[in-house]
Image (cartoon, grey):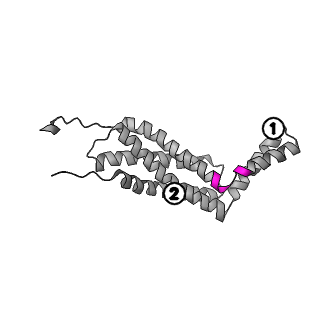
Amino acid sequence: METVKPNKMTSALNFGAVLGLALAILSLATYSLALYENSALGWVSNGVFILGVVWSIKRRRDSELGGTISYSDGLGYGTLVALFSGIIVSFVGYVYLGFVDDAFLQFTLDNQEKVFYESGMSSEEVDAMMKNVSLYMNAGVISLIAFFGQVFFGFVVSLIASAFLKKENVNFDDSI
């Protein structure tokens, strides 16, 4: 009897959705409680993301692939999980920052203006710089940067995790 491998895309989508929802809840907590400068919450969010990607690769190896996974399959699967979770987190961030509360955007603009003044710029220079910065400081750009950042971070985590979690099939009796 032949065993059927679960669909990689469906599995990654399911796990990415769960991870994305967990990260979205952490993001919403950060935004709604105005904990923008709380580094501990950032570390928790990064830890949840890393553990989620690593656990997803391990779970696929052990539960779906019978205990074996190649380096490339682990890398691809972990990156897919990061991609799907990034879509959810970015969408939630876009909706929240764009339609619910833009306090984070204003906080970031205020901090940037403060940095410009502290660097010795004149008021005219600061106004010109802030005009340029405010063009890119919107929910769409922030969400797009967050999406690509999360996918890249997931790729790096998957690169490392797959090196430790790979288990090649060493059964040479497949041709018998």
Q: Position of residue 145 (x, y in %)?
A: 60, 48
The answer to whether 171 is drawn above or below residue 1 in the figure is: above
Q: Residue at x 80, y 42 (%)?
A: 116
Q: Residues within 10 Å of mark 1 (few under 14, many from 20)?
A: few
Q: Give the extent of the magenta segment.
A: 135-141
Q: For mark 2, what is the residue? A: 88
- How packed mark 2 is, by other alpha carbons closer than 10 Å (few <14, some 14-19, many 20 or more), is many
Residue kind at label 2, given as amino acid type: Ile
Left or right of 5: which side holds 1? left
- Which residue occupies the foreground of this view, 109 or 175? 175
Is residue 159 at least partly visible in the picture? yes
Residue 43 can be seen in this image: no
Using the image as rendered, state which of residue 17 and residue 23 is in the foreground: 17
Q: Is residue 138 magenta?
A: yes
Residue at 88% of width from left, 45% of height from top?
A: 124
Taking the magenta stretch, the answer to whether it contains residue 128 is no
State the residue position of label 1.
Answer: 119
* Residue for point 27% across, 43% down: 67
Closest to the observer, 1 or 161: 1
| Label 1 element class | loop
Q: Of tags 1 and 2, which is closer to the observer?
A: 2
82 vs 41, left or right, is left
Q: Are marks 1 and 2 in contact (CB under 8 Å)?
A: no
- Residue 71 image point, x, y percent: 36, 37
> Mark number for residue 48?
none
Task: Tell me which secondary structure the magenta stretch mostly adopts.
Answer: helix
Q: Position of residue 100 (x, y in %)?
A: 65, 65
The quarter of the picture where the C terminus appears is top left
Which amino acid type corresponds to the residue marked 1 in the rendered image? Ser
